[in-house]
Amino acid sequence: MTNSGGRHGARRLLLQALYQRQLTGHEIAELNAQFSACDEFATVDGDYFRAVLNNVLSSTSTLDEMIDGWLDRPILQLDPVEHALLWIGVSELISQTDVPGNVIINEAVELAKEFGAQESFRYINAVLDKAAKSLR
């Protein structure tokens, strides 16, 4: 499945997987196995989930260096949801060139509204806007 709904669901699961990674330290194989086994996985773009998860987890240090340049506070002060959304967004801006930048930003903003702190969607929007201008 490669439709936008499938990718939206994949991003939703990615956010959960990357949040869990920050709290538990689970490795990619464990996250892949766990999330692939959940019922919701059958309705998402599984290849997209695996590709972005692999991209993020194989380059977290590089992504953090880049993200740090667009922040107005130390990266360690990011909420785990914000951090995960920025990893996903920046990773997609770099590696998913078939996806328009405004779609990537909008998806992150929508997930921030659903899972983030009250105004975190504004922050995610601002940071990813800077990232898109720099990367695209």
Image (cartoon, grey):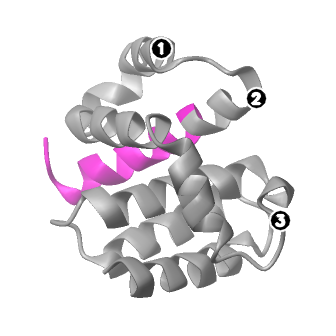
| Pointer 1 or 3: first along the chain | 1
Q: CA distance from mark 1 to mark 3?
A: 31 Å
Q: Amino acid at mark 1?
A: Gln
7 is higher (above) or lower (below) than 42: below
Which is nearer the eye, 45 or 29? 29
Which is nearer the eye, 25 or 123? 25
Of the numbered discs in the image, which one, if any, rests on residue 49?
A: none
* SS at circle 2: helix
Q: Amino acid at mark 3?
A: Pro
What residue is rendered at 47% in x and 53% in y?
A: 88
115 is higher (above) or lower (below) than 69: above
Magenta run includes residue 99: no
Residue extent of the magenta highlight: 1-17
What residue is rendered at 14% in x and 48% in y?
A: 2
Of the numbered discs in the image, which one, if any, rests on residue 23?
A: 2
- Residue 132 in the image: state x and y as whole percent: 41, 80
| Pointer 2 or 3: first along the chain | 2
What residue is rendered at 29% in x and 51% in y?
A: 7
What residue is rendered at 61% in x and 59% in y?
A: 65
Q: How crowded is the residue under tag 2: few (<14 C-alpha within 10 Å), some, or many (20+)?
A: few
| Pointer 2 or 1: first along the chain | 2
8 is higher (above) or lower (below) than 1: below
Q: How crowded is the residue under tag 3: few (<14 C-alpha within 10 Å), some, or many (20+)?
A: few
Left or right side of 30 for 4? left
* 2 or 1: mark nearer the eye: 2
For label 1, the residue is: 34
72 is higher (above) or lower (below) than 15: below
Q: Quadrant of residue 135?
A: bottom left
Which is nearer the eye, 65 or 43? 65
